[in-house]
Image (cartoon, rainbow, N blue to C red):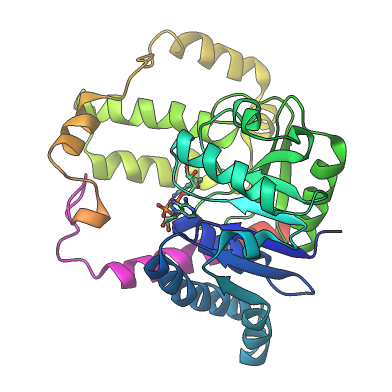
């Protein structure tokens, strides 16, 4: 049973992962190479735990109990020394990840499962950096990780069954929904499907088919509206696979098949328009109160989470 968890890299993902896993007899130690990032993570974790405890209808004492099971450490070796599971959430840079994973393995107990939160690297290839690839796997969380219910568990070619089952049980105990990705394909499940949708949305924008506002509106209010209740195959069965096959046959030759991002996107990036973090992106965020907008986003996601939990 996994009781002691170490999170290495306490940025956007690491802090939310720590908040999601702490409590109910599980202890989490959080490490970051940057002391300021570790301080920022502490504040962000307090907010995330408060959000979760409130959603579950518990009181502040529960929040204090959860926060009491989280420790912060500025040394990697002591962070992982007694961990049953170490989750690596450092930046998406293969050489940093290989170096950090090797150092984690050397300092962690031999029984520890080591997981990477990579979005895009092959688990099998990252496993080359390790002596015990059978105890290594991917846990691919989605942002914001303390709210989004599914976590993909990705097997590398050498991953043994024991670590997959142990992480599956841990995630279930923490109220998450694990989905095992049996084959280590780039992007796993969610990001592959999401990328196919994003490619088409950018192509529609570039071709002037509709404005960004209207494309977003159409996604949120049509198939996006249905998605919390109906997955792709459930929807196919409901509307009829005969109709589904006909529509795909008509459209697959029409939709975009580019193998690099649209110029509509790369032009914005070249102009430094990265979105919320630079004040300009597809939309103008310069006059928007970003913390309030983030809180509003999380409130909306939590109401969807209630629908999801009711259905599951
Ligand atoms: P981030 O940049 O917000 O956080 C990374 C943290 O790692 C930073 O705090 C940084 O100081 C720290 N760090 C850098 N080098 C380190 C080292 N050697 N040892 C320890 N800590 C170190 O990045 P993020 O968005 O949290 O992404 C982390 C991982 O999660 C990446 O692999 C990313 O692809 C993946 N991921 C991100 C998202 C997302 O939406 N942001 C979603 C799914 C997966």
How far across and down, in percent of the image, does residue 61 sit?
66, 92
Judging depth in this view, the residue of 187 and 95 nearest the camera is 95
**Does residue 312 appear in the picture of this structure?**
no
- Quadrant in the picture for the C terminus: bottom right
How far across and down, in percent of the image, does residue 57 sit?
66, 82
**Does residue 16 appear in the picture of this structure?**
yes
How far across and down, in percent of the image, does residue 86 sit?
67, 54
Asked if residue 278 lies in the magenta stretch, the reply is no
Looking at the image, which residue is at 22% across and 30% down? 266
Q: Magenta segment range?
A: 279-303
Judging depth in this view, the residue of 284 and 212 nearest the camera is 284
How many circles with numbers are drawn on the protein? Answer: 0
Residue that sits furthest to the left in the current view = 271
Looking at the image, which residue is at 23% across and 46% down? 274
Q: Is residue 269 left or right of residue 21?
A: left
Judging depth in this view, the residue of 250 and 45 nearest the camera is 45
In which quarter of the view is residue 264 placed? top left
How far across and down, in percent of the image, does residue 1 sit?
87, 59
Q: Is residue 168 left or right of residue 290?
A: right
Looking at the image, which residue is at 34% across and 46% down? 217
Image height of 67 relative to 105, above or below = below
Looking at the image, which residue is at 79% across and 65% down? 3
In which quarter of the view is residue 272 placed? top left
Image height of 202 relative to 138, above or below = above
Asked if residue 290 lies in the magenta stretch, the reply is yes
Q: Is residue 254 left or right of residue 176?
A: left
């Amino acid at each position: 049973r996994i009781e002691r968890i170490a999170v290495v890299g306490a940025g956007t993902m690491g802090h939310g992962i720590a908040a999601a896993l702490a409590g109910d007899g599980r202890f989490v130690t959080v490490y970051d190479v940057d002391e300021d990032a570790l301080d920022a993570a502490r504040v962000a974790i307090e907010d995330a735990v408060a959000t979760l405890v409130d959603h579950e209808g518990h009181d502040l004492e529960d929040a204090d109990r959860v926060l009491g099971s989280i420790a912060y450490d500025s040394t990697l070796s002591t962070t992982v020394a007694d961990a049953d599971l170490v989750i690596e959430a450092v930046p998406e840079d293969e050489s940093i990840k290989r170096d950090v994973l090797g150092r984690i393995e050397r300092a962690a107990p031999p029984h520890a499962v080591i997981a990477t939160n990579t979005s895009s690297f092959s688990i099998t290839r990252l496993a080359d950096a390790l002596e015990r690839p059978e105890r290594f796997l991917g846990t691919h969380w989605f942002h914001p990780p303390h709210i989004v219910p599914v976590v993909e568990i990705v097997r590398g070619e050498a991953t043994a069954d024991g670590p997959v089952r142990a992480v599956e049980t841990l995630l279930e105990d923490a109220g998450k929904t694990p989905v095992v990705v049996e084959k280590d394909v780039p992007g796993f499940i969610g990001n592959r499907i999401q990328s196919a949708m994003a490619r088409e949305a950018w192509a529609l924008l570039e071709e002037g088919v509709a404005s960004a506002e209207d494309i977003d509106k159409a996604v949120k209010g049509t198939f996006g509206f249905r998605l919390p209740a109906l997955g792709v195959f459930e929807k196919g069965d409901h509307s009829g696979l005969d109709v589904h096959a006909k529509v795909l046959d008509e459209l697959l030759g029409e939709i975009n098949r580019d193998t690099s991002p649209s110029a509509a996107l790369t032009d914005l990036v070249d102009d430094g328009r990265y979105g919320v973090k630079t004040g300009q992106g597809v939309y103008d965020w310069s006059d928007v109160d970003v913390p309030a907008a983030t809180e509003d986003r999380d409130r909306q996601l939590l109401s969807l989470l209630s629908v999801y939990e009711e259905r599951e």
